[in-house]
Amino acid sequence: MDLNTQSLLYAICREYAKKIDKASAFIWLHYKMFPDGCDIKMINKYFEACDLPKYNPTYLKNDLRKSKGIIAGKTIGTYKPNRELIEKLDAQFCDLILKDETIISDDRIIPKILYEETRGYIECLCKQINASYEYNIYDGCAILMRRLLEILLIHSYEAIGKIGLIQEASGEYKGLSYIINYTLSNKPFSLAKESQELLDTFRQLGNFSAHKIQYNAKRKYIDDVKVVYRLTMEELLYISKMKK
């Protein structure tokens, strides 16, 4: 089973007026992608992804405690949906769940449905990102995530006919720092607010793993950004016309 994440987020926001109902649905969505529980910080990232105000952490904890559809996750401070809520939301949003795909386990960064039928080198890179995460090679995973971001940003400029804006006179591409700064300053194409905010985070994550001698990436560093990273890559795949 795979998810049309962006469409599901928007559908959840349209369907529910109460913040706790949205939060519960975001926990369900997170559980479908990463069955390791969802913490308060991650729930608020989903609110930000929908351009909604953050949920006051104290109120959110209290409301989740009272919610009949939410139970504690395996890790302290995390939450997951109970069986009844899973069945309810699976049925409610069934049109946006692609049932012919394999369930995404919590050791995946980018699901197959996003990168299949794009280009061979992109498919290969996405598989390497997933594999490096699965086998605890977090520095390698961070560097590969940075590389995919760079490639998709370049292809996005190509797709809108503005590749010259990020090229040197020689035809070589400018560095990722320049491309990110130019993208954020000039907004040549539309990106969600959370994608814009985390573009430089992805760049730094890869840079630290590649160049800082005494730095080692940890799983938590990847986990903190993997949901928004996935959303950003999905956006760029469509902007670059790799996905239609």
Image (tube, helix red, strand yellow):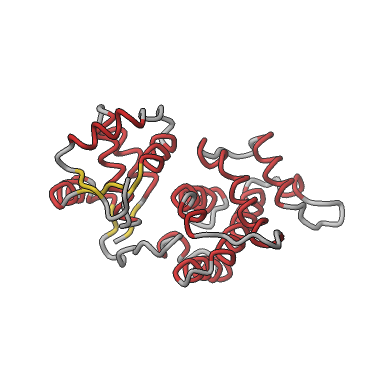
Left or right: 228 in relation to 168: left
Q: Residue at x 23, y 46 (%)?
A: 93
Left or right: 113 in relation to 151: left
Which of the 4 image quadrants contains residue 17? top left
Q: Residue at x 71, y 60 (%)?
A: 211
Residue 69 is situated, as x and y percent measured from the top left of the image, at 17, 43
- Residue 201 vertical placement versus 139 (above, below): above
Left or right: 207 in relation to 125: right
Residue 214 is situated, as x and y percent measured from the top left of the image, at 67, 61
Residue 223 is situated, as x and y percent measured from the top left of the image, at 46, 54
Report the quarter where the N terminus lies.
bottom left
> Which residue reaches farthest right?
169
Foreground of the two, 68 or 116 = 68
Q: Residue at x 13, y 49 (%)?
A: 84
Which of the 4 image quadrants contains residue 18? top left
Left or right: 238 in relation to 7: right
Q: Residue at x 49, y 50 (%)?
A: 225
Which of the 4 image quadrants contains residue 62? top left
- Count up the numbered dots: 0
Residue 4 is situated, as x and y percent measured from the top left of the image, at 36, 51
